[in-house]
Image (cartoon, grey):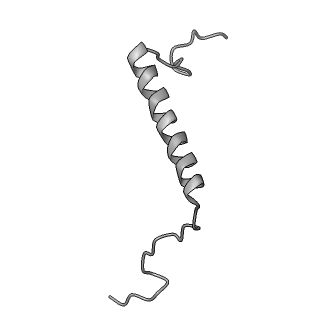
Amino acid sequence: MNTTPMNQARPVHMPPMTDEELEAQAIRELERMQRARDAKRSGYKPKRRGWNHADHR
């Protein structure tokens, strides 16, 4: 099989980030994970939509 440069998988180039930007990104990600964990612990369930509605004709 012939692999040309167009067919080879390459990682996407990430722009260089400062330490402050990396720290802010890490904090956002940790806060998102904490919110998800807290919602799971509280028993929160999002509303189900589209399958359990009465037939209104």
Q: Residue furthest left?
A: 1
Eyeballing the image, is 13 above or below 52? below
Q: Position of residue 54 (x, y in %)?
A: 57, 9
Q: Position of residue 47 (x, y in %)?
A: 54, 17
Q: Quadrant of the N terminus?
A: bottom left
Along the line of sight, which residue is nearer the eye, 17 or 34? Answer: 17
Name which residue lies at 58% across and 62% down: 17
Q: How many marks?
A: 0
Name which residue lies at 43% across and 75% down: 9
Eyeballing the image, is 31 above or below 53? below
Name which residue lies at 56% across and 22% down: 50
Q: Quadrant of the C terminus?
A: top right
Eyeballing the image, is 10 above or below 50? below
Q: Position of residue 3 (x, y in %)?
A: 39, 87
Q: Position of residue 7 (x, y in %)?
A: 45, 81
Q: Residue furthest front?
A: 19
Eyeballing the image, is 53 above or below 34? above
Along the line of sight, which residue is nearer the eye, 31 or 11? Answer: 31
